Image (cartoon, rainbow, N blue to C red):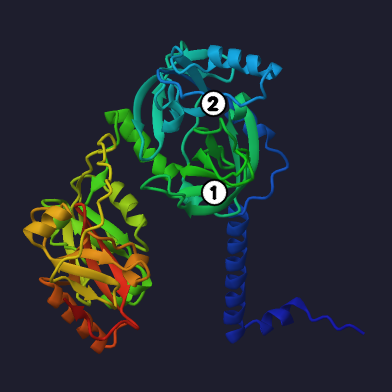
Amino acid sequence: MIIRRPARAQARLVTGSNVLLLQWLLAGLVAVTVMAMAMTARAAPVPDSFADLAERLLPAVVNISTTQTLKNPERAPDMPQFPPGSPFEEFFKDFMERHGAPDAAPRRATALGSGFIIDPSGLVVTNNHVIADADQITVVLHDEQAYKADIVGRDSKADLALLRIHAPNKLPFVTFGNSDEMRVGDWVIAIGNPYGLGGTVTAGIVSARSRDISAGPYDDFLQTDAAINKGNSGGPLFNMKGEVIGINTAIFSQTGGSIGIGFSIPSNMAKPVVADLQKYGKTRRGWLGVRIQSVTDEIAENLGLKDQRGALVASVSPGGPAAKAGLKSGDVITRFDGKDVTDMRHLPRMVAETPINKEVDVTFWRDGKKMQAKAVVGELVDDSDTEQAKATEKPEPKQDSGQTTVGSLGLSVATISPATRERFDLAPDAKGVVVTQVNPAGVAAEKGVRPGDVIVEVSQEPVKSPADLVGKIDAARKAGRRSVLVMLQREGDVQFVPLHIDGGSKKESER
């Protein structure tokens, strides 16, 4: 027999501490419900179809065709060798005379790419490499209407370009979304002009974030498995809201076709660049005035750092923002403008995106201590058109009398004198000792040290003579250290190189 309690009797049971328990349970239930709703809202379900989204976005995606005059066509390959009297000999000879002559007239080459409209007046975003060196740029809309395009601005470092077309009517357009909100596994679709097949839609997911593919100084690509092929460059990568969260730029492929590894410039990196191109015709980037390098395990050990976080300052530009703030070579920047510098490659982008003339806090590590400084960010001067001097091979120097062989490092050094300065073409203000020989089997050679390099510091202390260098190596060994941090100067550039001293000769030879 089931005994049912009256409603009044049940109400009497819910008193005292039981009321608190019930309130707690209800609050927990509400919290769990809210969390579940939030997770459901964020984790979008697998779409049944991309058709509605594609139909809405396709009109704003354009095909880009460029033509370029090749004034000096590459020399045609040599004619194959055939047996005497072969019928192919005359055929290839005639072909080469007509198409492969070295003095052939300039010819025109065409290339295809993609882009997207961001403003109804006709502003089009694409990759810089799509329109680089083009004599004429044509933008073809989704309805096959073609317009000649003018370049508003371009940025080779970010590989972005902004074009303008003049259409009689307002054009369909798309907007940028927040690429920082994209998570690995989120759905995306790419629209573009692969192999000239305009209006091609492919779908996939975000495969990875913050990819560095050595394409430029500000690499921070989104990786996607949505099919991207030749001709997709400059086209948009959309989220499920129809917002542009990436500009398709490169693929990893051994065949030239898509294998599901594509890379897109994040929208949050592209937006300020496009805004600058529209306003100034160029990109204005922040500048700190430092040359930096990665912090390796050996460098961290030598500097007394707990981990490899941060960017090591190799040199400071005289009169630059960093120099005025008091930073110097050997400092490790760990925080910039309130953001952690997790590794070297993130700092250039952080500085570049900082408003010019803004005063920022810089946290750095020096002499085993955490320090802070305030720096006023300057403007980076674009030196992309500056020609770099070509390296020339120097003859192997003859042995110097009085040079010192540092066996534990696998190199020989000498005092900087008029003779060594001339032999190795050293800068007039070079200070330290010059490397005269490098043992191919030594630790110095392993780290890329070569004759003509100038050792300026060891363990952040100046080196004044070969004997001074030997003394610092011996002191480091006696202190139980396995390596020393050497500052090298090479052709006007400065870098830090950690060199092992384990197992080396305990007594360096001098001759």
Compared with 139, 478 (above or below) is: below
**Apparent side of residue 126 relative to residue 309 in the rendered image (left or right):** right
**Apparent side of residue 324 relative to residue 131 in the rendered image (left or right):** left
Please name the amino acid that badge 1 sits on.
Gln
Q: Which mark is residue 48?
A: none
SS state under label 1:
strand
Few, some or many residues within 10 Å of mark 1 (<14, 14–19, 20+): many
**Apparent side of residue 464 relative to residue 234 in the rendered image (left or right):** left
Please name the amino acid that badge 2 sits on.
Asp
- The location of residue 86, given as percent across then percent down, is 69, 19
Few, some or many residues within 10 Å of mark 2 (<14, 14–19, 20+): few
Quadrant in the picture for residue 89: top right
Compared with 216, 84 (above or below) is: above
Q: Residue beneath label 1, please?
A: 223
Residue in the picture at 83% in, 80% down: 4
Q: Which mark is residue 78?
A: 2
Q: Nearer the viewer, mark 1 or mark 2?
A: 2
Note whether residue 142 is visible. Answer: yes
- Quadrant (top left, top right, bottom left, bottom right) of the C terminus: bottom left
Compared with 474, 322 (above or below) is: above
Residue in the picture at 71% in, 39% down: 49
Judging depth in this view, the residue of 172 and 329 nearest the camera is: 329
Residue in the picture at 13% in, 77% down: 467
Note whether residue 426 is visible. Answer: no
Looking at the image, do the residues carrying marks 1 and 2 touch, with CB atoms under 8 Å apart?
no
Compared with 511, 268 (above or below) is: above
Residue in the picture at 37% in, 63% down: 342
SS state under label 2:
loop
Real-space Cα distance between discs 1 and 2?
Answer: 41 Å
- The location of residue 133, given as percent across then percent down, is 39, 24
- The location of residue 183, given as percent across then percent down, is 54, 54
- The location of residue 487, given as percent across then percent down, is 22, 66
